Image (spheres, helix red, strand yellow):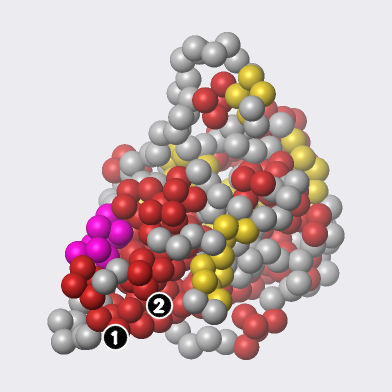
Amino acid sequence: MPARKDAEHLPGFLFRAVSFERGRLRILDQTQLPHRVTYLYPTKAADVVAVIKRLAVRGAPAIGVAAAYGMAVEAGRLPDRNLRSGLERAARMLVAARPTAVNLKWAVVRVMQSVSVRAMSPEEKRRAVLAEAQRIETEEVERSLAIARHGAKLLPKNAEVLTICNTGALAAPGMGTALGVIFQAHIDGKRPHVYACETRPLLQGSRLTTLELQRARIPVTLIADSAAASVIDRCDVMLVGADRIAANGDTANKVGTRMLATLARAARKPFYVVAPSSTFDSATRTGQQIVVEQRDGEEVRAFAGCRAAPARTVVFNPAFDVTPARLIAGFITDRGILKPPFRKNVSSNP
Ligand code: MRU
């Protein structure tokens, strides 16, 4: 996919979560937001694994791009004789960092394929790894712009939108996914208003989504996750992101998404999943095959060092849940809008 001009003119309010400039990988530390804008400069794949695991970089497309650049920094430090085996080890570590978002595996596999030609010299391999990572980033930016254009057409004027987690430029290079649609509708003068679920336990909604929308001057009302049913009658549409979309349309996304989809169905409101082609996984037949990442219970027992439950409380802390395809009105993708029947339309997409 050739780099296009509009990617060079992204609105100034957008963050750049991951970048690679002058040989240095830079990652915006999202654990510090909204208080501080600080950057991390990982110099090896193991550092990138660590920042992905602790959600300093997060969101399915963004971690794919971070992992691809993680392979590039690793290639830059490995000696010639260990280049192949070192890259294979780095690839395994990166893919295992977060198991649900398919973009991570997809990006790492692409990078490994770029060096699968035996006749390449070590220097050619290092250049190929970096070039592939840059291509992946450019493509994801273009996909986000295409998603935003397709999705914004769906929104009525003065749309009231309910969303969860964070799906802006912090989560996907370029404009983001679900928030990208809202940014575009705002740019088009449609004056959307957003209800943002706070998204316990790690508060991506209240820490990140409100921040991104406020920077764009889009009105946003933060709600506790449990207040979703109290605002649903005022909403026109729900827009959410995705971490993996199975061939039948079942969709893994931030835990709480299935609850919203069930609510949307009960209230007869359209529930759209917004995602690039890199999040569609035709190798996973249904949602039952999706591995849901389980995280440390301490994330629920406490927040930012403040205890929210007795220290030894038993916790169930899945990072994601799987929304059955039957609750989804459609997928807003870079290739257009996919409607049911998903078994036919989703599996033929990427
Ligand atoms: O745990 P996170 O913050 O990485 O979860 C992110 C989400 O669930 C997003 O909705 C998804 O990755 C899509 S991001 C464009």
User: Which of the two residues, 124 or 202, is positioned nearer the viewer here?
Assistant: 124
Residue 224 is covered by the magenta coloring = no
The residue stretch that appears in magenta: 84-92
Left or right of 244 in this view: 19: right
User: Which of the two residues, 245 or 92, is positioned nearer the viewer here?
Assistant: 92
Say which quadrant the C terminus sits in.
bottom left
For mark 2, what is the residue?
A: 130
- Amino acid type, callout 1: Glu
Looking at marks 1 and 2 on the same chain, the residue that comes earlier in the sequence is marked by 1
Q: State the predominant SS element of the stretch in magenta.
A: helix
For mark 1, what is the residue?
A: 124
Q: Which mark is residue 200?
A: none
Secondary structure under the numbered disc 2 in the rendered image = helix
Measured as percent of width and height from the top left, residue 171 is found at: 57, 57
Residue 91 is covered by the magenta coloring = yes
The residue under the point 42% across, 74% down is 133
Left or right of 145 in this view: 278: left
What crowding class fits label 2: few (fewer than 14 Cα within 10 Å), some (14-19), or many (20 or more)? many
Measured as percent of width and height from the top left, residue 136 is found at: 44, 74
Examine the rendering and report whether any part of residue 308 can be seen: yes
Label 1 within 8 A of ligand 1 by Cβ: no
- Amino acid type, callout 2: Leu
The residue under the point 81% across, 55% down is 214
Measured as percent of width and height from the top left, residue 90 is found at: 30, 59
